[in-house]
């Protein structure tokens, strides 16, 4: 699972608290499995045994989106506060693919392409 970004990824999850060190290890494994395939879903990005472990991790009552993102927020704040200026790029665009005539190559709301 090692990749050239694994140190950076590990830094982003330092201090993750899920009530069990095994869960902290699992979030690192999950994060390290995605950089090489950021455009695919978990079932495509990982083998069945890892996928089952991922589903158990996300299904745990000790795991929340806040708990997952908290260490990244802390690391981001450290980086921001060490700089004189921080630029935040933000896109507030809203895109709607709903049209009466439809568009070639796009699938409606009920399906995915």
Image (cartoon, rainbow, N blue to C red):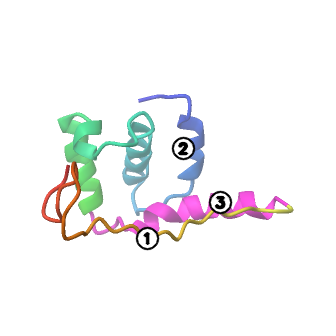
Residue where numbered disc 1 is placed: 94
Q: Nearer the viewer, residue 93 or 86?
A: 93
Residue where numbered disc 2 is placed: 9
Residue 74 location (% of width, % of height): 63, 63
Kind of element beneath mark 2: helix
Name the quadrant of the N terminus. top left
Horizontal relation, residue 56 to residue 15: left or right: left
Mark 2 vs 3, N-terminal side:
2
Which residue is the extreme one toward the front?
Answer: 101
Residue 14 location (% of width, % of height): 57, 52
Q: Residue at x 20, y 62 (%)?
A: 102
The mark tally for this picture is 3
Residue 48: say if magenta: no
Q: Which residues are magenta?
A: 60-83
Q: Residue at x 54, y 44 (%)?
A: 9
Q: Residue at x 59, y 37 (%)?
A: 7
Q: Is residue 17 visible?
A: no
Circle 3: is it few (<14), some (14-19), or many (20+) Cα within 10 Å?
Answer: few
Q: Which mark is residue 45?
A: none
Q: Which mark is residue 76?
A: 3
Q: Estimate the spatial distance between the alpha carbons at disc 2 and disc 3, rounded to whole Å.
A: 12 Å
> Are the residues at dot 1 and dot 3 in contact (C-beta closer than 8 Å)?
no
Circle 2: is it few (<14), some (14-19), or many (20+) Cα within 10 Å?
Answer: some
Q: Of helix, strand and loop, which mostly describes the magenta segment?
A: helix
Mark 1 vs 3, N-terminal side:
3
Q: Residue at x 76, y 62 (%)?
A: 86
> Are the residues at dot 2 and dot 3 in contact (C-beta closer than 8 Å)?
no
């Amino acid at each position: 699972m090692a990749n050239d970004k694994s140190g950076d990824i590990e830094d982003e999850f330092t201090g993750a608290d899920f009530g069990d060190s095994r869960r902290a290890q699992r979030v690192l494994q999950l994060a390290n499995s995605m950089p090489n395939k950021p455009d695919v879903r978990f079932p495509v990005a990982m083998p069945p045994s890892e996928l089952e472990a991922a589903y158990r991790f996300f299904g745990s009552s000790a795991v929340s989106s806040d708990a997952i993102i908290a260490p990244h927020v802390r690391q981001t704040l450290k980086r921001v506060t060490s700089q004189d200026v921080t630029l935040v790029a933000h896109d507030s665009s809203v895109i709607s693919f709903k049209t009466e005539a439809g568009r070639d190559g796009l699938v409606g709301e009920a399906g995915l392409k």
